Image: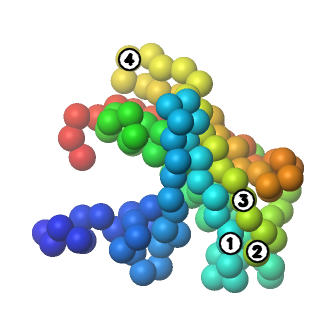
Amino acid sequence: MDEKATHMCFACSPDNPIGLKLVFEDDGVVCRTRFTPGLVHQGWNGRIHGGILSTLLDEAMAQLLYRRRETAVTAELTVRFKRSAPVGRELLVEARQAAARGRLVEVKAQARFTDGTVVATAGAKFLKVRDI
């Protein structure tokens, strides 16, 4: 397989022409990214699609583990939408580890406006795997 084709993550790859191209920062405890949804990310007119918002949360949590060199896949994802988010308004997405037991890691995340207003929260269970 072409090496470039192996890094086409919809959320984080800079090479995916239809991807979100998210860039992450990690301070060892919190993994974060910023994203401003455009018209192509909307569900209802002028509002970000819930699936895109869920992707932002899931990717922030996965990136937290990836940056720790832990190979894990999402086993369960729960998203709670607090309010709709308009396109064109920047979101800050942050993830933190909540617990770990054996191969299972629990992570929490939230998406909020830059004024601190929470748009959505998520919790996920990730399963550590040997090979993907």
Residue at 52% over, 47% down: 25
Q: CA distance from mark 1 to mark 4?
A: 37 Å
User: Which mark identifies residue 87?
Assistant: 2
The disc, 2 or 1, on the residue closer to the chain's N-terminal end is 1
Kindly indicate the quadrant of the structure image that contains residue 47. Answer: bottom right
Look at the numbered discs 3 and 2 and tell me whether their residues touch, using CB distance below 8 Å.
Answer: no
Closer to the observer: label 3 or label 2?
A: 3
Q: Is residue 12 visible?
A: yes
Name which residue lies at 80% across and 82% down: 45
Three-letter code, disc 2: Val
Amino acid type of the residue tagged 3 in the rendering: Leu
| Residue designated by label 1 | 37
Q: Residues within 10 Å of mark 4 (few under 14, many from 20)?
A: few
Q: In front here: 27 or 69? A: 27
Disc 3 on helix, strand or loop? strand
| Residue nearest the viewer, comparing 114 with 73 | 114
